[in-house]
Amino acid sequence: MLTAHKIALNPNNAQATYFARASGTARFAYNWALAEWQRQYEAWKADNSLPQPSQRALRRQLNALKRERYPWMLEVTKNAPQMAIMQLGDAFRNFWAGRAQYPRFRKKGVHDHFSLSNDQFSVKGSRIRIPNLGWVRMRESLRFTGRIMSATLSRVADQWFVGITVDTGDSPKRRAENQGATGVDVGVSALAALSTGEKVVGPKAHKALLQRQKRLSRSLSRQHQAAKVRLGIAANAPIPKGVRLPVSENAKKARAKLFRLHARIANIRQDALHKLTSDLTRRFHTIAIEDLNVRGMLKNPRLARAIADMSFFEFRRQLEYKAGRRGGRVIVADRWFPSSKTCSVCGTIPEKMPLAVRQWTCPDCGTLHDRDVNAARNLPALGLAAPSRATTSSVECDACGEEGSGVSQSGNVKPASTKQEISTKLPLRRFGQV
C-alpha cells in the first residue's frame, strides 16, 4: 500500500531560494514539453510518417539542448525537469482515460512544486538530503516504515513541505470498535448528523475569516491599481496584452498575507474533516452516506459558498480510504432516495418538504423529527438492504496523519495528531458535538 506523509520543512534562505529555482525549472520544463507536444501532434496529423509525441522522446530532446539553450537548468537537480515531463505524460494518460481535462500550462506562484525519484534523495531522522543542496531540516521524522518511492516538495503560501511516498506493503489493519452501522447526513448548518442523534458542527472557516479575506483582497487590489497608474494605465482599465505590471514590495507583502490566510482556511477545514472521519471509522464498521451531486449543488448562488466551505467530496474521500484501512465499508445510498422526508419510525413520506423546514412531525405516527438526524437514521437501513453499493477503500495513495502513524507504524511510536498543519499563531475556533 502506498502512503504519503506530508512534512513541513525548516529551510534557510539559501535552501528556500533553491526550492524556488527548482520549482521554476520544473514549471518551465512542463510548459516547454506541453508546447512541444502540441506542435509535434499537429505535425503528426499533417504527416503520419512523423513520430507521435511522447514524454520519453521529449525528455531526450530537452537533455540534448538544455546545456546550450537553458544552462541555468544545471543549477538544480536533474529530477526537476525530468519528473515534470513525466507528470505531463501522466496528465495525458488521465485525459485519454476520461479522468481529467486536457493538460494546461502551469503558472508561476500557483501550486509551485517539483518531484524527486527515490534514488535522488535520502531521509535520516528529521532531515532530508536534496541533490545539489545538502541536508534540510524537517519538522518531524518520517512516520512510516517501508520502501520510499518518491518525494514532492511543494510550497503553500510561504511554507515549504515535502510529501514522501512510502510503500508500506500489506500491513495489518486496525479493526474498528464496531459500534454497529451508522448513517451520516452532511449539511450546511451542521457538518454531519449521525443516526445516533449526535451532531458535529463544522468550523465554517471561510465564513469566520471572510471579512479578513475581503480586507486583504482589497489591499492587494489597491496595489495593482497603483501599479497601473504608474504605467499610465487607468486604474479601472484592463491591462493591455503583453504588458507586465511592476510588483512593488508592498504588493508582495499584501499577496503573501492573502496567501497565508487562504492556507489557514484550508488548514482549519482539513483539520476538522480529518478528526471527524477518523472518529467515525474508529467507532463504526459500516457507515452509510448519501451520493450527493455536489457540482449541481454549487450552482445554487445562495448556498454555494456554504457548501464549498464544508467540503462534502473531501469528507467522502477521507471516509472511504480510512474505512478501508480498518477493514470497514462505506455504503453510498441512491442519490434520489428521500431520506430527509421519510419517517424513520413508520416510513411515511410527505408530499413536500421545503429546505427551510428543519423539524417536522410525521402525520401518521406523530413523531417529531429533526430533519438531519432523521435522514441519517434512514441511511443505514437502506444501505444494509443494498450491499452491492458498498465500497471499501480502493485508494492506494492517501494522506497521512490520522490515528497515529498509519497502519504500518510500530506500536512503540507515539500516536500522532490528525492535524498536519503547523500554524499556531491564531486560536482555532472550537467545534464539536452538540
Image (tube, rainbow, N blue to C red):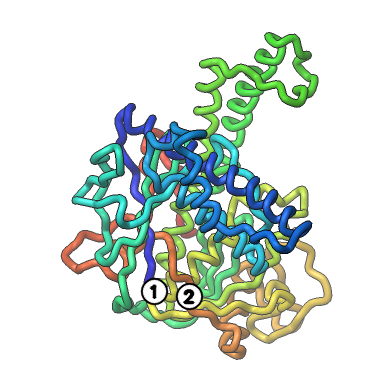
Residue corresponding to mark 1? 325
Q: Amino acid at mark 2?
A: Ser
In the picture as drawn, the residue positioned furthest to the front comes out as 49
The residue lying at 41 percent from left, 65 percent from top is: 278
Report the disc number at residue 77.
Answer: none
Q: x, y percentage for residue 143?
A: 26, 58
Q: CA distance from mark 2 to mark 1?
A: 7 Å
Q: Is residue 5 visible?
A: no
Label 1, secondary structure: give it.
helix
On screen, 198 above or below 217? below
Give the quarter of the image for residue 144.
bottom left
Q: Amino acid at mark 1?
A: Arg
Label 2, secondary structure: give it.
loop
Q: Is residue 372 left or right of residue 203?
A: right
Q: Is residue 47 left or right of residue 123?
A: right
Few, some or many residues within 10 Å of mark 2 (<14, 14–19, 20+)? many
Q: x, y percentage for residue 425?
A: 38, 33
Residue corresponding to mark 2? 393
In the picture as drawn, the residue positioned furthest to the right comes out as 351
Give the quarter of the image for residue 212.
top right
Front position in the image: 390 or 356 = 390
On screen, 146 above or below 216? below
Determine contact: label 2, label 1, CB under 8 Å. yes
The residue lying at 61 percent from left, 17 percent from top is: 246
